[in-house]
Amino acid sequence: MIFYVIEFQSSSTGAAIPLAFTVQADAEAKYHELLAVAAKSAVPKHGVMLCNEDLFVLKSEIYTHEAE
């Protein structure tokens, strides 16, 4: 099975960065690595989703950062 980790960045424009893994543990490790970056990001909305090849969402989380 293929596992997808998709990073989302939303500001005045949007970006989605997909990564694919064949081992679920590797996909979960990347998911948490990207969330650690998103937690401290300056991007207004920065999140990550983990899903399988059937597009079943296993995990997702988004950080919303207010302008300082």
Image: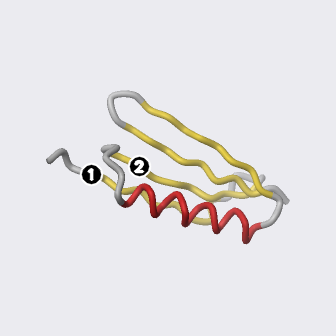
Quadrant of the drawing holding the N terminus: bottom right
Residue 28 versus residue 53: which sits nearer the camera?
28
The image position of residue 31, as x and y in percent, is 59, 62
The image position of residue 50, as x and y in percent, is 62, 59
Mark 2 secondary-structure assignment = strand
Question: Which residue bears the numbered disc 2?
Answer: 46
Reading the chain from its start, which is encountered first: label 1 or label 2? 2
Q: What count of labels does the image hold?
A: 2
Q: In the image, what residue type sits under mark 1?
A: His
Rendered view: 41 above or below 17: below
The image position of residue 52, as x and y in percent, is 73, 57
Q: Are marks 1 and 2 in contact (CB under 8 Å)?
A: yes
Residue 48 versus residue 37: which sits nearer the camera?
37
Residue 59 occupies quadrant: bottom right
Q: How is this picture coloured?
A: secondary structure
Q: Is residue 38 left or right of residue 55?
A: left
Q: In the image, what residue type sits under mark 2?
A: His
The residue sitting at 35% across, 58% down in the picture is 40
Q: Is residue 49 left or right of residue 55?
A: left
The residue sitting at 70% across, 53% down in the picture is 4
**Quick one: label 2, few (<14), some, or many (20+) residues within 10 Å?**
many
Alpha carbon distance from label 1 to label 2: 8 Å
Q: Is residue 68 left or right of residue 24?
A: left
Question: Which residue bears the numbered disc 1?
Answer: 65
**Quick one: label 1, few (<14), some, or many (20+) residues within 10 Å?**
some
The image position of residue 23, as x and y in percent, is 80, 65
Mark 1 secondary-structure assignment = loop
Residue placed farthest to the top in the image? 13
The residue sitting at 31% across, 47% down in the picture is 42
Rendered view: 53 above or below 15: below
Residue placed farthest to the left in the image? 68
